[in-house]
Every structure is written in C-alpha cells, then in structure tokens.
Amino acid sequence: MNKDQRDSNRRNARQLETIVHNAEMARHRCENCGEPGGHWISTRGSSLEALITGIDDQEGFWTCQKLYGEDGRRLVA
C-alpha cells in the first residue's frame, strides 16, 4: 500500500468517525434542556463508592445554550 492510499484511508476514517459521532449526539437528548446533543462535560467520573451505593457523585458542568448569553458568559440562575 502506498502513501497516497494510506492518507486516503486516514481521511476516510476521520470522516466516518465524525459522521458516527454526530449521529450519536443527534440521538441523545440532553436531560437538562431537552435539546439534541450531550451537554454534560464530566471533569471527574464516578467513584468506586458511587458505583457500589448507586449514588451519582460525578463532577462537571452543563454546556446548554440556554445557560449562556450571547457574549458566551454564564447566565445567573
């Protein structure tokens, strides 16, 4: 396989990965605002204790459009 074919395969793989990612995000509904897409950014996943007890202790933030103004700053709730 030559370099041109490998590069073509890599471009195709990136395009397919993007298509699949977009399709998955379109199927998912945000539990905070109800719009399509994943709007939760996790900064720390669940701990072992949370998995055992069933309590969600993730840390993160929402990126929903309704929470941010036109200037990109977080709106006061």
Image: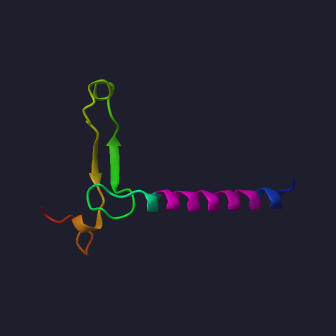
**24 or 47, which is in the foreground?**
24
Q: Quarter holding the C terminus?
A: bottom left
Q: Quadrant of residue 13?
A: bottom right
Q: Which residues are magenta?
A: 8-24
* Viewer can see residue 42: yes
Q: Looking at the picture, how far across and down is residue 68, in whole percent? A: 24, 67
The main secondary structure of the magenta stretch is: helix
Q: Residue furthest right?
A: 1
Q: Residue at x 28, y 29 (%)?
A: 50
Q: Is residue 54 left or right of residue 21?
A: left
Q: Looking at the picture, how far across and down is residue 35, in whole percent? A: 33, 64
Q: Is residue 41 left or right of residue 18?
A: left
Above or below 34: residue 41 = above
Q: Residue at x 78, y 56 (%)?
A: 6
Q: Is residue 77 left or right of residue 55?
A: left
Q: Quadrant of residue 17?
A: bottom right
Above or below 1: residue 15 = below
Q: Residue furthest bottom?
A: 70
Q: Is residue 23 magenta?
A: yes
Q: Quadrant of residue 43?
A: top left
Color scheme of the displayed model = rainbow
Q: Looking at the picture, how far across and down is residue 2, in whole percent? A: 86, 56
Q: Is residue 10 magenta?
A: yes
Q: Residue at x 58, y 62 (%)?
A: 19
